[in-house]
Image (cartoon, rainbow, N blue to C red):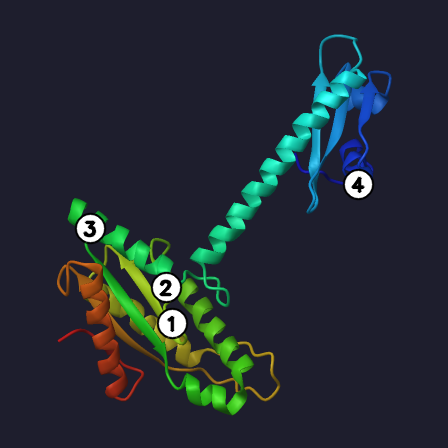
Amino acid sequence: MQVRGNDSLINHVIYSGKPVRVTAPDIKIAIVFLAKSLLCVPMISPRQKKGALCVVNWYTSNEFSLDDEYLLFTLANYASRSLENAQFVNELKKKVTFDWLTGVMNRRAFEETLNSSIEYCKRYGTHLTILFIDIDGLKTYNDTYGHVAGDERIKAVAELLKKQKRITDHVARYGGDEFAIIATNTDLNSTKELAERIQKTAELSTPFSITANCPQPGFTLSMGMASYPVNGKEAIDLLKAADKALYKAKRAGKNQIMCPD
């Protein structure tokens, strides 16, 4: 239950850190809970207050005792520690799965997802395409306007890719200025349509910048594609093929979309 307002009993328990035992004569409890009595104790961890643990007596007129309060305190302590441990594990999982700057998957998570996606394709006879994306001229951009502006451009590309992809696709930051997309159940032709849409959006975009001297015009992207099973049946083969196609796009003058030979 989410606590709303500043005058609720649970809110009082959370912020005072003190338990409350209430019986039916308290008109608020009688009306709101239709309860005979209520015991509420805070859930407090070393890091922060988590909430409150409440027990409601609906049927008898017996009040909760000090022993009941002690027992509930013990349970609340275990519950609070469990929540804190779960939160820690979740934060750790995010750190090893997502890129710290952009919030998309990192390279390790991308390659794990690619391997599992290929196994799915093998089992069910479907296909997928990976798309490597490189930000053109980012080094020159960094040298001219600084790395803070460069980071803003990288984040702008990540946001663009997240908006343009389908809900079933996966976006990752593969390297410094390089991104990757796993387009599920999609061949080269369909993925090229996605790539062209991304390119056009990038050229017309005006990414946010926190620096006053950072230029506003859009940017260009070079891309390389490789599809399962046409260009490879294992992850390493697809990665090499897409990387080779990306290199070909860069050599062709950038702002190009290329497939393997």
- Front residue of 94/209: it is 94
List x then y, in percent, for residue 77.
Answer: 67, 32
Other-residue count near label 3 (Cα within 10 Å), few / some / many at <14 / 14–19 / ≥20: some
Query: With respect to residue 229, does 140 lie above or below?
Result: below
Residue with the mark numbered 2: 107
Between discs 3 and 1, the one toward the N terminus: 3
> Mark on residue 248?
none
> What residue type is disc 3 on?
Cys
Q: Secondary structure at mark 1?
A: loop
Is residue 181 depicted above or below 133 in this figure? above
Residue in front for this viewpoint, 65 or 188: 65
Task: Choose the circle earlier in sequence order: 4 or 1.
Answer: 4
Residue contact at pointers 3 and 4, CB within 8 angstroms: no
Q: Amino acid at mark 2?
A: Arg
Q: Amino acid at mark 4?
A: Tyr
Nearest the camera: 100 or 58? 100
Residue that badge 3 annotates: 121
- Distance from disc 4 to disc 1, alpha carbons, whole Å, reads 45 Å
Mark linked to residue 175: 1
In the image, residue 100 above or below residue 260 = above
SS of the residue at dot 4?
Answer: helix
Q: Tell which tag, 3 or 2, sits nearer the viewer.
A: 2
Q: CA distance from mark 3 to mark 1?
A: 26 Å
Could you tell me the amino acid type at mark 1? Gly
Q: Position of residue 164 (x, y in %)?
A: 39, 65
